[in-house]
Image (cartoon, helix red, strand yellow):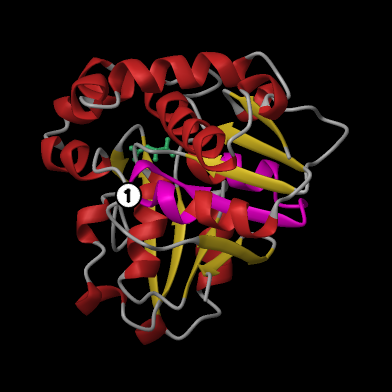
Amino acid sequence: MKLFVYHTPELTPADSVPDCAIAVDVLRATTTIATALHAGAEAVQVFSDLDKLVKISAEWPTSKRLRAGERGGAKVEGCDLGNSPLDCTPELMNGKRLFISTTNGTRALQRVETASTVLAAAIINRAAVVEHLLAHKPATIWILGSGWEGSFSLEDTVCAGAIASSLVDRLGVSLGDLAGNDEVASVIALYLQWQDNLLGLFHLASHGQRLLRLNCQEDLKYCSQLDLLNVLPIQREPGVLVKNP
Ligand code: MLT
């Protein structure tokens, strides 16, 4: 296994895809996707384009769909939900398809949708992602941070570090054996420094601060809980994620 970390969708190589691509948007799209599937959503379908989301979801029975839209951290008017994982209750999600468009996370998933395996990772489902990698041993793995509008983000970077650090431990290999690019050592260093205070790091992060200004303190707390849910969102067809059985 060779692991490559890219901080934003823009930094990924344009001319190739890995055997396994892992999109990360800890605050909050991949946390929300994992939570929705854990709560019983039939599938989560992601869109970078909101008009396309409205058009495709209109073909779905209204009782079987939910529309979630976020821009700049806030809920998009006319959608059923914004992008808070705390809204993804079993009562609301059960059996429904969640159609979702967010500022950065859904764009990251779309960037790698042609890879043979596409996973969505967050802090809350880190262990489930690692178990899948250990069981399937893909030759090349990309962890792709969503960042914020083309810039690096602390929360996605520390999640990449949590995955990479666990892989090094569980495989019993050296960092040099696993790392495909320099970013891998740096994400592990960030994780090792902040592993006992992920919430503190999220409070420092620029998007964390944006969410705090929008009164989303509880979202930050939820998103910072390592290995909370045993759920693995995996792409079944381009743009459609389901719970790995
Ligand atoms: C995104 O896609 O940029 C985020 O998930 C934004 C958010 O916190 O809702």
The residue depicted at 31 percent of the width and 74 percent of the height is: 93
Horizontally, residue 93 falls left or right of residue 127, namely left
Horizontally, residue 212 falls left or right of residue 183, namely left
Q: Reply yes or no: does residue 110 show up in magenta.
A: yes
x then y, percent, for residue 54: 50, 63
Q: Quadrant of ligand 1?
A: top left
Label 1 CB sits under 8 Å from any ligand 1 atom = no
Q: Which residues are magenta?
A: 107-128
x then y, percent, for residue 142: 67, 36
What kind of residue is marked 1? Asp
Whether residue 11 is visible: yes
Tell me the SS state at disc 1.
loop
Horizontally, residue 30 falls left or right of residue 176, namely left
Please state which of residues 206 and 26 is positioned toward the viewer in this rendering: 26
Horizontally, residue 176 falls left or right of residue 91, namely right
Q: Reply yes or no: does residue 154 show up in magenta.
A: no
Q: Which residue is mark 1?
A: 227
The residue depicted at 52 percent of the width and 76 percent of the height is: 245
